[in-house]
Image (cartoon, grey):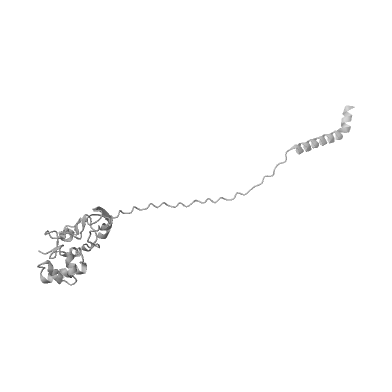
Amino acid sequence: MNGSWLDKNRHLIFGMLLVAALGGAIAFYLRQPAQTPIEIVPVEPTLTVTPMVTPTVTPSASPTPAMVRVYVTGAVLKADVYVLPQSSIIKDAIIAAGGFAPEADPERINQALELKDQQQIHIPRQDEENPPPPVQGGANDNNPQETGGSVSMAGQRVNLNTATLDQLDTLPGIGPAIARRIIDYREKIGGFKNIEEITQVSGIGEATFAKIKDLTCVE
């Protein structure tokens, strides 16, 4: 009897099993979590910028400017040794020494002369008799005719018969032009016989002679 029932209901049982299987499959599918779709994002190339490096420039060392050492004496406020830049003139040395003293005689020294290392600059006084030469000494001057020691040994005065143009230029009231006339005149006459003869040179009058007569000599 059982066998006949199964045979008669075989299609029904198969259909029920199929429905149950489909229902289980559907239930299993519905219980699965929803899958997030995968989004493909294109990668943009990154441009790497390398910063420019500015080279550091090391400044070159500046050469130390040359200096001159001068000894300023006489009628100044602060007689002493002063260190001044090269190409300085006597006026700069006087300013460094505090300027002229009240008893100074500025016209008896050429303030425009350029200084040399190790020179002595003497500022004469108004009542000073037989003062030392205004400019003497100086390094690297092997020829005594070209320094303030360019003066004669007689009373340390400028020898009108041997002095160079620069030496004559140190005398008060005597510039380069008059110094040249003195040299030309002494060559013409064969040398001065006395200091008074210098008044025969054009440009030297009694006033100028009064300033230089105590600073000059002839030999």
Give the total of numbered labels: 0
Q: Inspect this view and state whether residue 13 appears.
A: yes
Image point 80% across, 36% down: which residue?
A: 23
Q: Residue furthest right?
A: 1
Residue 97, percent across and down? 26, 55
Image point 12% across, 72% down: which residue?
A: 188
Image point 86% across, 34% down: which residue?
A: 12
Asked whether, in this view, residue 70 is left or right of residue 39, the answer is left
The residue closer to the viewer here, 65 or 145, is 145
The residue closer to the viewer here, 88 or 64, is 88
Assign the N terminus to one quadrant of the image: top right
Residue 175, percent across and down? 21, 67
The residue closer to the viewer here, 178 or 11, is 178
The residue closer to the viewer here, 193 or 64, is 193
Residue 138, percent across and down? 20, 56
Residue 202 in which image quadrant: bottom left
Asked whether, in this view, residue 112 is left or right of residue 20, the answer is left
Residue 181, percent across and down? 17, 70
Establish if 121 lies above or below 8: below
Q: Inspect this view and state whether residue 89 appears.
A: no
Establish if 65 lies above or below 165: above
